[in-house]
Amino acid sequence: MEKEHKHVAVSGYYGFNNFGDEAILKVLTSKLKEEGCYVTVFSKSPKNTGLSLGVNSVYTFSLPKVIDTLKKCDVLISGGGSLLQDVTSLKSLFYYLFVIAIAIFFKKDVIIFAQGIGPINNWFGRLLTKELLKKCKYITVRDENSLFRLRGWGLKPDLVSDPVWSISVKERVSMGRIGVQLRSWKGLSQKYLMNLARHIVANYGDKEIYVYSFQDALDLDLCKHFEAQLKLINPSIKTKLLKALSIDETIQSFANLDCLIGMRYHACLLALKYGIPVLALSYDRKVEKIAEIFSLPCSMLDEKEDMDELFKSLKNIDMKKVKSKANECLFDFTNIINAIKN
């Protein structure tokens, strides 16, 4: 098929240095460029986004530039991530709906890309979301709750896997390193963190502990604190705090891990992509879900949990089964590309 040079605008939680969202964007823009599309990304850090991905980028909150881009583009892709919900912020919901509404006003094709939809508690936000989604050309959602929610609204979305499953990784080379990836969360108590640190030292005190901050603005202080806790328990333990990493640097560093103790969904996903054993720390249903699918031990961040049993399960994961299942999880771009071009 001859490649058509469509201009695609991409709207999402981009440029905020969140690994998961930036990894999704990397996969998406790589595919769009491969298909000959001209890409403009709305980003909080347009210079960084443009340079790192080789795309055009405009500032997310420069409404004149956003509107001008939507006027000139052929297609708007909204997503991925959980954009259309008001649990995080009602203001952000209305922003992403505004972008979709302007694209529809200019009679552009709108594609909802691998989104988690809802919950939307505000009645007007829910009504507006429902009406705008009815006018979108193609909708894909990343979870069953979103699928059933939109079917209840009379829509016909497709359920897709996470785009990050399609990211390229090299061969894993074990170097005696243990990854610990934490995120700031209200349900994470000091008692729980100290218990986790004790068990990491007890089980992996002879390894080098890599403590990952996936979004420095939110997580870095917690990661520094946890590294200090590890050293308090065992002053001779080797640790390294990884912060401000690029997407590629993060992906490459995971190749040398023996196992991961991770909170963020995309940290767990990346480890599984490499075939690395994972102990999931669940702050969200999506983390529990990936643990269930891959039969991983999963902590609910409860101070009274049997941490010994969790670490025992981590060491006994059947990685052949995990690798086999991970290999089945590639994201299929066929319908997305067809919706852009036809």
Image (cartoon, rainbow, N blue to C red):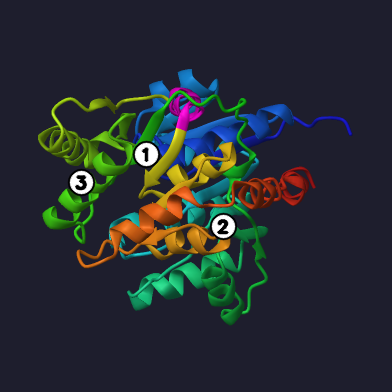
Is 186 contained in the magenta span? no
| Alpha carbon separation for disc pair 1 and 3 | 28 Å
- Judging by the rendered image, the residue that carries numbered circle 3 is 198
Q: Is the residue marked by circle 2 packed among few (<14), some (14-19), or many (20+) residues within 10 Å?
A: some
Q: Is the residue marked by circle 1 packed among few (<14), some (14-19), or many (20+) residues within 10 Å?
A: some
Is disc 1 placed on a helix, strand or loop?
A: loop
Is disc 3 placed on a helix, strand or loop?
A: helix
| Alpha carbon separation for disc pair 2 and 3 | 26 Å
The residue sitting at 71% across, 50% down in the picture is 328
Using the rendered image of the protein, determine whether residue 164 is visible from the camera's viewpoint.
Answer: yes
Using the rendered image of the protein, determine whether residue 95 is visible from the camera's viewpoint.
Answer: no
In terms of secondary structure, what is the magenta stretch mainly? helix
- Judging by the rendered image, the residue that carries numbered circle 2 is 294
| Residue 28 image position (x, y, % from top left) | 60, 38
| Alpha carbon separation for disc pair 2 and 1 | 24 Å
Between 54 and 234, which is closer to the camera in this rendering? 234
- Judging by the rendered image, the residue that carries numbered circle 1 is 18
The residue sitting at 27% across, 66% down in the picture is 305
The residue sitting at 27% across, 34% down in the picture is 205
Q: Amino acid at mark 2?
A: Phe
Which of the two discs, 1 and 3, labels the residue nearer the N terminus? 1
